[in-house]
Structures are given as C-alpha cells and as structure tokens.
Image (cartoon, rainbow, N blue to C red):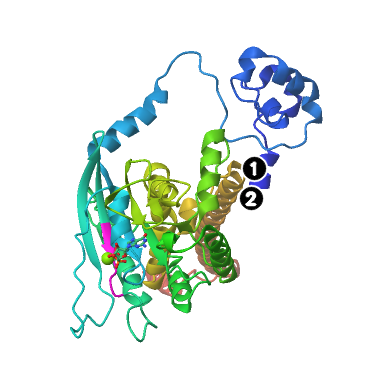
Amino acid sequence: MADSYYDNPPLSAGSGGGSISPNGAYGEERSGGISPNSRATSPNASYANGGTTMSALPATPTPAVQRKVLQSWVGFSNLPNQVHRRSVRRGFQFTAMVVGESGLGKSTLINTLFETKLYAPKEYPPPGVERGKTVQIESISADIEENGVRLKLTIVDTPGFGDYVNNDESWKPIVDNIEARFDAYLEQENRVNRKQLIDNRIHACIYFIQPTGHSLKPIDIEFLRRLHTKVNLIPVIAKADTLTDEEITSFKQRVLADIAHHGIRIFQPPQYENEDEETIQENEEILSKVPFAVVGSDTLVRAADGRQVRGRAYPWGVIEVDNESHCDFVKLRQMLVRTHMEELREHTNDVLYEDYRTDKLRAMGVSQDESVFKETNPAIKQAEERTLHEAKLAKMETEMKMVFQQKVQEKEHKLKQSEEELYARHREMKEALEKQKLELDDKKRRVESGRPLTPEKGSKKRFGLGK
Ligand SMILES: Nc1nc2c(ncn2[C@@H]2O[C@H](COP(=O)(O)OP(=O)(O)O)[C@@H](O)[C@H]2O)c(=O)[nH]1
Ligand SMILES: [Mg+2]
C-alpha cells in the first residue's frame, strides 16, 4: 500500500535541482537528517547533493512532513508555556496505590514521600479482635501545593493484602478496584457531556516486597502477574534498613530475575531519542535502582553530626531517608514525583487504559470500522475512483442501450402495423378494382352480343320500344 504511494513521488526525477522544495528534503534524507538549521550555515550542502544525483536517486520515500526553516518568528514555540500555564491553572491529579502485606511500612512511606501526615499512626486491633476477612480498599486524598502548583494526590491503600491464611485471591479485589476505576472513566468518556473528566484511575502501584533476602514469594508473583497489564507496577523492597548492602544487591538481582522469568512488565522510565545527556543519565540512574530499596520515616532524628534528619535511629547509628547512599528513597521519589509523574499518567491513559477499553468494547461487540482510519493513499484512491467511474459509465451505457432497443422495437412494431394496414387497404382496393373489371367485362360482352346491358334495363327498354 505504502509502496505504491511512494512509487509516485510528487517531484519528477528529471526535473532537476531547481524544482526541489527549498527545504532540501532529499538531501536531508540521504545525509541522515541534517537539522533544518544547518542549512543556514551551509546552504548548498543538501542542494548540491540532491541536484547532481537526482536522476540516480533510488525511490526514497518522500517524507510526509517537510521541514521548513521559518523566516520570521511565528510564535508557536510558546506552546509549552501555554500548556504549562493551563496545567498550573487546572492543577494535577495523581493516584497511587500501595500494596503489600501489613507492617511493611506502606503508610509510613507515603507520609515520607509527600512530606505530609496522610496517615495517622495506625491503631492495631488487640489480639482476639476479629479483623476484616478480605482485602479492603481505602483511599485518602489531599490537595497539596508547591510553588503555586496544585496537586490532588490520592493514595489508595489495600490493607489486608496477604494477611490471611488463604491468600490465593488477594489480588482479586485489587484488580476489581483498578478495573472499576477504568470503567468509571470509560463511562464519563461515553457521556454526551465530556467536560471535566474526573480521572480516578490508578497511575502507579507501589508494590512492597518483604525484605526476606531470598526471592519473590508466590503471592508476589501472582499479584505482579495479574496486575502488570492493568497498572504501572513499581516494586520496592520494604524496610531496606533491615538488610545489609550486599544482601540488598543480591536480593535485587534475584527479584529482577524472577520478574523477567515470569514475563512481568514493571514500569521503567522510557528512553527517548534526542534526549539531553543529563536526562539520559538521570533515567539510567533511576533504572539501575529498580526495585528501589526504601526506608520510610516520618520522624526527625539527630544524625551523628548533629543534623536533624528524617530517618531511623539505631544503637549503631542513623539511617537517613533522604540520603542516597543510605537507601533508594530519593530515587523513588524523584521518579514518582519529580521526573516521571506525567509519564506514569500518560502510560496509564495511552496504553493500560486503552488496552482495557479496547477489550471491553470488543467484548460488548463494538467493532471498529477500520476503513475510517484507512491511510489516504492518492494512487489507490485514484484507482478506486477510476473503477467506480468506469462502473458508472458501463451502467449508463447498458441503460442507454436498453432504452435504444426499446425505442427501436416500438418503431419497428409501428412500422409493421402501418405496413399491414397498407397491405390490407391495397388488397381491398385491388379486390374492388377486380370486381369493377369483372362488371365492365360483363357489360362489354353484353354490348357486343347485342343484349341489353342489364335485364331490368333491357325489359324496360323493350317495354319502351314496344310503346
Ligand atoms: N525498620 C523499618 N521500619 C519501618 C519502616 N517503615 C515503617 N516502619 C515501621 O513499620 C511499622 C508498620 O508501618 P506502617 O507504615 O504502618 O506499615 P503498613 O501496614 O504497611 O502501612 C511501623 O512501626 C513503622 O514505624 C522502614 O523503612 N524500616
Ligand atoms: Mg498502612
């Protein structure tokens, strides 16, 4: 399909350099994409190339979008600022879910992340008091503001996960919850009035791995396997202060091997081309820490050098939450809040939600009319139009032939009729003539034989003569 399109490049090969569009698209293609600005410094570079070798050019695809160097300031470079202002005005919504067995420090980590006491210290039920039988889903929202940027942060907690004797289906209420949020969004999208969509979808799921130092447990694998197509999974090793550095390194390796072995997709900062060195480095550093070994604390302790730090004090020293050499908390926060929050939201919307939505609509029997999205290929379109036109012509021709034949038949019929009429008259006249001739012959014979012409007349005459 695409081939035939490119077989007919809008520029004729023999037209020479003069008619090449001034952006030198061919030269750019061949020289591996010179940025449009480089033309300003060496304006002939791409021309010379394109001009002399035009006729020998292979059928290189003509880029659909041609690069243009603007002669004056148009102003759309201000778009990012406009988007920025609009975003600030609207504020942001972000919903994170935390999953993991109780006591792994989920609530503490959330408080640490957003530097707010979203969660009050937990009151554990006294022994003997019956706990809920299933995983509960609890969500807390807070409007937080930083430098004029508002963020509506929602944390969805899942107490009860993995806390029961039978945890076979611990993942189920969580999947249900995530899907219910997708459904709610889908329902809003399908409304007549789609202004003000409220996005309660889960943008990230921080999964707390117990710091066993061994490998993932079956419940972890089951959960990750069930959830990886529905949510951005961010695995973290909980309470990393309970493991030594070496233990953390080897535990991370085993966890990653388990994840790879089971074909589980976890969220990874995407790598884009054309990204600046600093961003690439930042992403690589983040990536190298997955799964993040985190330590949470929402209390201040006094470090050895007297500083007040967020951390955990032990008889042998203080573990600082915000110290990158102590744990990966800073990297996790950097990814989640400072560098990849938008990426997480985008991936949720464009990939995870989109897949869910497609499956859902397909299951409902809604199918997509692919022809609507068919790429418009001039050659194919032309051919299609030609066939249509030819078919129309052929139809017109047969119709005309039919009408013609009908008319001819009618005329023939009429002619035949008048011919028959003529014949009939002819016959009649001939018969009449013949009759007259016979009468005349008879008369002639009578006259010749001296007999009266008619018996009546003759007798009359005789009577007359007799008088
Ligand atoms: N050693 C250690 N203890 C922690 C850490 N984070 C939380 N805790 C403690 O673990 C207990 C349970 O924490 P909590 O946040 O309520 O866990 P949750 O049930 O997963 O929400 C509390 O006593 C916390 O002080 C951590 O990173 N390291
Ligand atoms: Mg909790």
- The amino acid sitting under disc 2 is Met
Is the CB atom of the residue marked by disc 1 within 8 angstroms of ligand 1's nearest atom?
no
Compared to residue 118, the image places residue 465 above or below, namely below
Q: Position of residue 153 (x, y in %)?
A: 26, 51
Looking at numbered disc 1 in the image, what kind of residue is underneath it? Tyr
Question: What residue is shown at x 51% (from left), y 38% (from top)?
Answer: 279
- Secondary structure category for the residue under label 2: loop
Which residue bears the numbered disc 2? 1
Magenta-colored stretch includes residue 157: yes
Residue denoted by label 1? 5
Seen in the picture, residue 73 relative to 219 is either above or below; the reply is above
Quadrant that contains the C terminus = bottom left
Residue 335, image x and y in percent? 43, 47
Answer whether residue 143 is magenta in the image: no
Label 1 Cα neighbours within 10 Å, binned few <14 / some 14-19 / many ≥20: some
Q: Where is residue 190 shown, x and y percent of the image?
A: 28, 58
**Quick check: is the Cβ at mark 2 less than 8 Å away from ligand 1?**
no
Q: Which span of residues is magenta-colored?
A: 155-160
Q: Position of residue 387 (x, y in %)?
A: 59, 51
The reply to whether discs 1 and 2 touch (Cβ–Cβ < 8 Å) is yes
- Position of 310 with respect to 41 (left or right) is left
Q: Nearer the viewer, residue 125 or 309?
A: 309
Q: Residue 143 bears which disc, if any?
A: none
Q: Which residue shows up at 48% across the image and 76% down it? A: 217
Q: Quadrant of residue 65?
A: top right
Neighbour class for label 2 at 10 Å: few (<14), some, many (≥20)? few
